[in-house]
Image: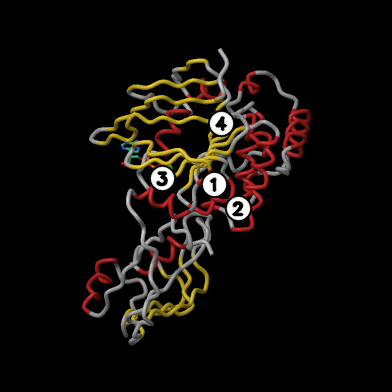
Amino acid sequence: MTTDFLVEMKQITKKFPGVLANDRVDLQVKKGEILALLGENGSGKSTLMSVLSGLYRPDSGEIFISGQKYSFKSPRESIDAGIGMVHQHFKQVETFSVAENMILGSHKSKFLVNAKSVENEIRDLSRGYGLEVDPSAKLWQLSVAERQRVEIVKMLYRGSKLLILDEPTAVLTPQEAKELFQVIRKMTEMGESIILITHKLNEVMEVADRVTILRGGKSIATRERSQVDERELARLMMGQDITMPQKRNPAKLGNDVLILDQVSAAGDGERAGLSNISLTVKEGEILGIAGIAGNGRRDLAETIVGLRAVTKGRLIIGDKEVSNFTPLQIIDEKSVIFLKIVWGPDWCPTWEQ
Ligand SMILES: Nc1ncnc2c1ncn2[C@@H]1O[C@H](COP(=O)(O)OP(=O)(O)OP(=O)(O)O)[C@@H](O)[C@H]1O
Ligand SMILES: [Mg+2]
């Protein structure tokens, strides 16, 4: 049987207790394309891809790869069928080399492997795709972007024909994200297919060939990228017209309500925490904090609410120093201050710029 599609998922339903995470979802991937899988938090994207990568078994529905029907009983079976998923939080062994991480758990590790020949194989493979990694480097020496590259090369090494990337740019700088997009474009030219999970509209517009939109566990629409704009994508994703924020009147700023004066805070284990952060928030002000995942945004929020110890500097709320108050004591300061910490809407089209 011939088919235009490398992968077809038909009427996939997956229930968790009390949640219908995927509700008769259809999804098709063409050979050599970049398909964006777009949806809000909780719309069912990761669940659907976990079904495709053999982590979950669907309650009903069918999966076809190159026209052949599969029912995966394990991730191994999905990998053997050519599906490779790069999760947002990679499971890697820090003290192992890149090459050792790649052969770990692969079929090839069942046999005696010649480390040098594996390293050469990986070096050739990564160069071919423009994904330079040093196979002999230890994982702990690498940046997050390099570790992500290792995961991608690992999937290629295992023979993936379809690469699923779960929100890959969340851990990258804008420049690294651009480089990743160049690489995945090159990969599609070499015959690889890609599913890019995202909730950033600009990424869909920048790199995808087609986009499938999930909402509330259902597949809502599939569009050619050339036939949509960000407004239409936002409408499909949210189920209603989105009014972009109007120009706000300049806020009337009052007194300082929060001051961080050269604050340092403890990290977790070997990970650094905060180092010498100074900022001031005034009454009536919205202060944006930008940064890539893993660079201290959460540590900052946790320090302000008393969940993380201040090791240096001063944390001041209202006109009172509250460094190393307990969360309860800080909540009690609310007679002085109402401070709301909001995690950014990642899908917001203007957020990145
Ligand atoms: N293992 C699980 N057990 C129970 N409920 C789950 C499980 N995994 C996901 N869910 C629920 O299923 C729904 C879909 O979740 P899923 O993680 O697939 O969404 P998502 O689109 O990937 O969201 P996000 O953008 O936040 O990653 C959500 O309501 C979620 O709470
Ligand atoms: Mg997800």
Left or right side of 244 for 101? right
The tally of labels here is 4
| Pointer 4 residue | 84
Which quarter of the figure has residue 323? bottom left
- Tell me the kind of residue under disc 1: Pro
Task: Say how the picture is coloured.
Answer: secondary structure
Whichever of labels 1 and 2 marks the residue nearer the N terminus, that label is: 1
Which quadrant of the rendered structure holds the N terminus? top right
- Which numbered dot is residue 39? 3
CA gap, disc 4 and disc 2: 20 Å
Q: Secondary structure at mark 3?
A: loop
Circle 1 or circle 3, nearest the eye? 3
Whichever of labels 4 and 1 marks the residue nearer the N terminus, that label is: 4
Q: Where's residue 312, x and y in %?
A: 47, 74
| Pointer 2 residue | 177
Q: Tell me what residue is drawn at x 49 percent, y 74 percent.
A: 277
Q: Where's residue 68, x and y in %?
A: 52, 15
Q: Is residue 198 above or below residue 58?
A: below
Residue with the most extreme top position: 1
Indicate if the residue with disc 3 has its beta carbon within 8 Å of ligand 1.
yes
- Tell me the kind of residue under disc 4: Gly
Q: Is residue 133 something that shows in the picture? A: no
| Pointer 1 residue | 168
CA gap, disc 1 and disc 3: 15 Å
Q: Nearer the viewer, residue 54 or 234?
A: 234
- Marks 1,2: beta carbons within 8 A: yes
Q: Where's residue 16, x and y in %?
A: 29, 32
